[in-house]
Structures are given as C-alpha cells and as structure tokens.
Image (cartoon, helix red, strand yellow):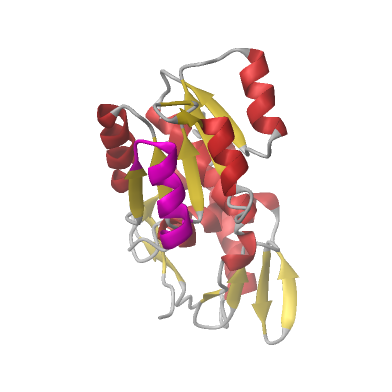
C-alpha cells in the first residue's frame, strides 16, 4: 500500500528527447508516481500547464522553439509550481540563471535515477508539506510535519530516531519491515549492532502511540522478522 501523499501530485516532464522523456517517466512510474504528462516544446508545455495545472515540472533548457528559462518565465506569469531543471548544460551561469529565476533545483545529464527521485521527493515534500494528512492509528494520530503524536488531545513530541523509525514503518504500512531495515533507517548504512537500541526505541514509541503498550495493536511485533505498523482507514 502506497501511502506517500506526494505520489498523487501531477508532474509535467518537458524535453525534446523522446527517449529521455520515456526513461524519466518510467523511473517515476516505478516509484509510484502515476499522474504524468510529457511535452517536447515550449508551446506544448505551456498549453498543458494552463489546462492540466500540474503540481511540479521538470524542464530541459534546450528546446526546439525556445529554452527552459523562457518557459519558466512564462509559467511564472500564472503559476508558482516548483520546477527542477534537467539539462546537459552544466555551466555555472546556466545553473545560477535557472535558480535565480525561481527554479527549485538543477540536475545535469547524465544523472543517476536514484538522485532524480530523491531530489523530486525533497522538493515536493518541502513545497506541499501542509498537504500531508494526519495518519490515524488505533489510539492516536501521527503528525509527521510536526514530528509528534496526538493522543487524548495531548501533543507528544517524537525524537529524531523515533521519527525515522516511524517513517520507515509508515512507508511500508501493513507490511513487515525487518529489523535490519529499521536499523538502517535510524542509524544509516552501517546499522549492525543496533538491535537492542531499536528494541528500546520501539518500546518508547509504543508508550506514545498505544493505549496499552504491553498489548500493542498499531505497532506489531512479527517474531523473528521485524515489525508492522497498522494504519486505520
């Protein structure tokens, strides 16, 4: 179950290379982004922006009937959607021009698919953070924007590690998340030796989210494998 609210955003991809457009679109679809449209020219992109009203745009600089900079200027006349430039031109003046015109980021071709996905996700979460709904559990709600648990009208702050662990569980809500995956989410690429620390954090998380921490119904232990977060609705 994909519960990441940013995956529902509408994304416009603009490039004059059909193969690159297909590649980027496929990368995004594999990550769960389904609302995508593509354009090969400035005029086509402007038409889509006015009619479809995308939430985000990835723009190439070099286009057959203009350039990404002029396209961004025209878009800004009626929309303030976040924009990322994806281009083969890596000169500093191009980068500064794009960012100075209000672009949110700039990636130079060739690029790593993982980097593109990470940068798009970061921009969308920053620009649409207020769109993230509260996550309902059996006895409380999670507010990731404020890093807190709301239970019995009390706002209980989460520590950084608790936040990372809950985020990893929430991204895989309803599925088993292994101990190794949770340790990696909280302690990085060398997670070995943190199993006992993870258990201590799980215990404290349950104290915050469960009505009865000794009989959890939202954060379930899957013996010998890991944990599972049960989200309401």
| Quarter of the rendering containing residue 162 | bottom right
Q: Residue furthest top?
A: 91
58 to 143, vertically: above or below: above
Q: Residue at x 69, y 23 (%)?
A: 96
Which residue sits at x=38%, y=45%? 44
Q: In the figure, 216 relative to 130: above or below?
A: below
Q: Magenta stretch: dominant SS?
A: helix
- Looking at the image, residue 145 sits to the left or right of residue 35; the answer is right
Q: Nearer the viewer, residue 44 or 100?
A: 44
Task: Name the residue rendered at 63%, 48% in the picture.
Answer: 76
Asked if one can make out residue 230 in the rendered structure from this viewpoint, the answer is yes
**Quarter containing the N terminus:** bottom left
Q: Quadrant of residue 104?
A: top right
Residue range of the region highlighted in magenta in the rendering: 39-54
Please say whether residue 52 is one of the residues in the magenta stretch.
Answer: yes
Q: Is residue 188 visible?
A: no
> Seen in the image, is 106 located left or right of residue 62?
right
Query: Which image quarter holds the C terminus?
Result: bottom left
Q: Residue at x 34, y 59 (%)?
A: 223
Percent position (x, y) of residue 139?
55, 83
Residue 184 coordinates in the image, percent (x, y): 49, 39
69 or 115: nearer the eye? 69
Res. 132 image quadrant: bottom right
User: What x and y, as percent, mark residue 137?
Assistant: 50, 77
Q: Is residue 58 magenta?
A: no
Between residue 154 and residue 3, name the one nearer to us.
3
Answer left or right for 155 relative to 170: right
Where residue 129 sits: x, y (%)?
A: 62, 59
């Amino acid at each position: 179950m994909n519960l990441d609210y940013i995956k529902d955003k509408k994304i416009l991809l603009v490039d004059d290379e059909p193969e690159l457009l297909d590649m980027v679109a496929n990368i995004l679809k594999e990550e769960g982004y389904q609302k995508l449209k593509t354009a090969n020219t400035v005029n086509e992109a402007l038409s889509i922006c006015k009619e479809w009203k995308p939430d985000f745009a990835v723009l190439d600089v070099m286009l057959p009937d203009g350039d990404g900079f002029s396209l961004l200027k025209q878009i800004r006349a009626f929309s303030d959607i976040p924009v990322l430039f994806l281009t083969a031109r890596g000169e500093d003046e191009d980068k500064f021009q794009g960012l100075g015109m209000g672009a949110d980021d700039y990636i130079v071709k060739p690029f790593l698919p993982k980097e593109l996905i990470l940068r798009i996700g970061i921009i969308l979460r920053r620009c649409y953070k207020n769109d993230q709904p509260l996550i309902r559990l059996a006895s409380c709600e999670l507010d990731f924007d404020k890093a807190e648990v709301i239970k019995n009208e009390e706002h209980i702050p989460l520590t950084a590690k608790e936040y990372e662990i809950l985020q990893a569980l929430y991204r895989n809500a309803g599925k088993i998340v292994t101990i190794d995956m949770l340790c990696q989410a909280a302690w990085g690429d060398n997670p070995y030796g943190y199993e006992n620390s993870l258990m201590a954090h799980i215990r404290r998380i349950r104290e915050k989210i469960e009505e009865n921490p000794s009989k959890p119904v939202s954060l379930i232990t899957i013996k010998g494998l890991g944990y599972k977060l049960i989200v309401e609705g």
